[in-house]
Amino acid sequence: MPQLTVPLARGLARRTIRPFLHPRVPLAVQRARLDANSGPLPPGTHVLRRSPGGVPARRVSVGPQDPERTILYLHGGGYATGSSRSHLSWGAHLARATRSAVYLLDYRRAPEHPYPAALDDTLAAWRALAATTPATTPLVIAGDSAGGGIALTTALGLAAGGSGHPGDRVADAMVLISPWLDPLRPWPYEPRYGRDPVLRPAWLTCCAEWYANGVDRETLAPARNSDLSRLPPTIVQCGTDDILAPEGAAFSDRAAAHGVTVDHTDYPDLWHIFQVGAGLLAAADEALGDLAGSLDDVLKS
């Protein structure tokens, strides 16, 4: 399939995604538009409907070989949009590159199900996967954007024994792609706001209010003041034009200062979750290759 150039991909994102991610667009339209945006699947993709812990999910693998690891993946979408359908192509490319079974979780979304519904669903699914995944098979938690925030909050609870079950299996590694880690932070103007062809602060603010439903900032952003030292090795990727890139950088610096193994990469002139263009955008394929290599490294160490 022909590859998109970065300028063409940027223009497509600005025309086909950004206009729909706006507070004035009905939420049902936003959700339908993102679900229709998933790209082509790699040859040999297998998709099965599953419900770990009673939570709907798609289990994605590629090729005939048995996957070497399991990834619980939390999709982005501002806690209110996105689904296993919108992220199906990305999940398949991730599964192929990392030789994994990827579970794309359909956690409950705001505003119908505000905090902590998504976290409760993630923990239920994690426990179910942990119960059926051999100890010798790495179990990874991952997510992009809002899903990155869910992944980090879940990993923090597991690592600190604060999940309600002190014996819960902790993640062997964590992957955060353009993570949204501080939903209720203020939004003073930055030049990058005009360079990101996907996100705008007004939409993020609306989604954060739906998700929070009155909960305070500290509750929604536990990494700001928590002990991060027990987190698993972590891979963080952002584009330099991503509105949320400063959150990924700040977290990476703080986690590294707490002794966590962190592989943080900023990709010049790229935008929010550009990685989901894998298979169509060479820069996304490069980032995915970097991710797969880093995951191999941390799981072998």
Image (cartoon, rainbow, N blue to C red):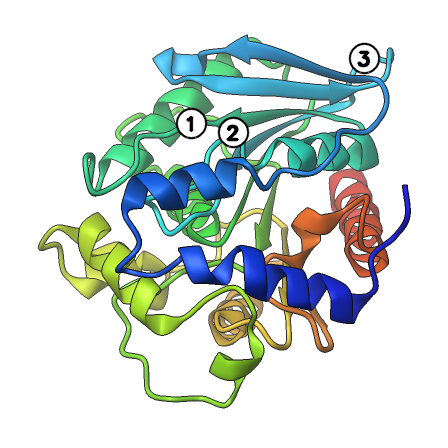
Question: What residue is shown at x 51% (from left), y 10% (from top)?
Answer: 50
Q: Quadrant of residue 141?
A: top right
Q: Is residue 168 left or right of residue 139?
A: left
Q: Earlier in the sequence, mark 3 or mark 2?
A: 3
Give the farthest residue toward the right: 2
Q: Nearer the viewer, mark 3 or mark 2?
A: 2
Q: Secondary structure at mark 1?
A: loop
Q: Is residue 275 visible?
A: yes
Q: Is residue 120 left or right of residue 190?
A: left
Q: Secondary structure at mark 2?
A: loop
Q: Earlier in the sequence, mark 2 or mark 1?
A: 2
Which of the two residues, 29 or 77, is positioned nearer the viewer here?
29
CB atoms at circles 2 and 1 under 8 Å apart? yes
Residue 140 position in % (x across, y down): 60, 34
Amino acid beneath label 1 = Asp
Q: Nearer the viewer, mark 1 or mark 3?
A: 1
Give the class, few, some or many, for how many residues have Cα within 10 Å of label 1's Cα (few <14, many ≥20).
many
Question: What residue is shown at x 46% (from left), y 66% (from top)?
Answer: 199
Q: Quadrant of residue 133?
A: top right
Residue 208 position in % (x across, y down): 26, 58
Q: CA distance from mark 3 to mark 2?
A: 22 Å
- Depicted 201 relative to depicted 237: above or below: below
Q: How many marks?
A: 3
- Depicted 290 relative to depicted 142: above or below: below
Which of the two residues, 68 or 274, is positioned nearer the viewer here?
274
Question: What residue is shown at x 32% (from left), y 80% (from top)?
Answer: 187
Residue ID for mark 1: 106
Amino acid beneath label 2 = Ser
**Residue 84 tag number:** 2
Q: Is residue 163 visible?
A: no
**Residue 66 tag number:** 3
